[in-house]
Image: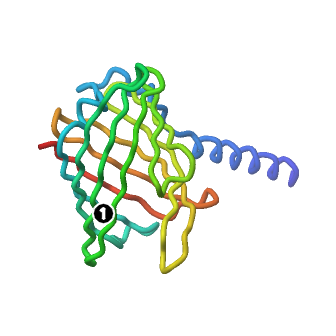
Amino acid sequence: MKTIFYRFTLLIFCGLFVVSCSAPQVSQYAAEKPVLDLSEYFSGTIDAYGIFTDRSGEVKKRFTVLIKSNWTTVDGKKVGTLDESFDYSDGTKQKRIWTLTEQSPGYYIGRADDVVGDAQGQLAGNALNWTYTLALPVDGTIYHVQFNDWMYLMTPKVMLNKAKMSKFGIELGEVTLSFHKR
């Protein structure tokens, strides 16, 4: 009887584990409107307002971002530059300049000085999913943390962003942003 109980418990645990590991796919947003065109939305000046929350949901940092962006065509591919200036509520400032390159329709790579390797982006409908590793400075030490970043175009001028930050598969916190195109 104990063997049956243990097998049943193991089966339930494995089933719950598989379900909890499933993640949304960007393709499930393909029919959503308005359709996100990165070179259209990230063109000109955008203001963003964000928070970083830890695992418990406590707000650890608040910040604003001024993004100046433009796009060109290089070798037949769309290439965008997003110049981001961060101002944190504690008075610190940060700069990040992204270079985004469309590899094929709906697929992008992104590069920035503090991004380890390439960011991988895929979009469909109103959604964009970025995955990348960021070299994050904390108290004089650099940590490589993984981001799973989801952006959703709400209106032609407003986009919401939710990013989960993790290390070794353990969630560290979330970044939530609201973008407003001028």
Query: Looking at the picture, does residue 58 appear above or below residue 169?
Result: below
Label 1 sits on what residue type? Ile
Q: Residue at x 41, y 52 (%)?
A: 163
Query: Looking at the picture, does residue 99 appear above or below residue 86?
Result: above
Q: Residue at x 56, y 67 (%)?
A: 143
Q: Residue at x 23, y 26 (%)?
A: 34
Looking at the rendered structure, the number of numbered marks drawn on it comes to 1
Q: Position of residue 180 (x, y in %)?
A: 17, 46
Closest to the observer: 75 or 5?
Answer: 75
Q: Position of residue 89 (x, y in %)?
A: 25, 74
104 to the left or right of 167: left
Identify residue for label 1: 51
Q: Residue at x 37, y 32 (%)?
A: 79
151 to the left or right of 172: left
Closest to the observer: 70 or 12?
Answer: 70
Q: Residues within 10 Å of mark 1 (few under 14, many from 20)?
A: some
- Quadrant of the image occupied by residue 125: top left
- Quadrant of the image occupied by residue 11: top right
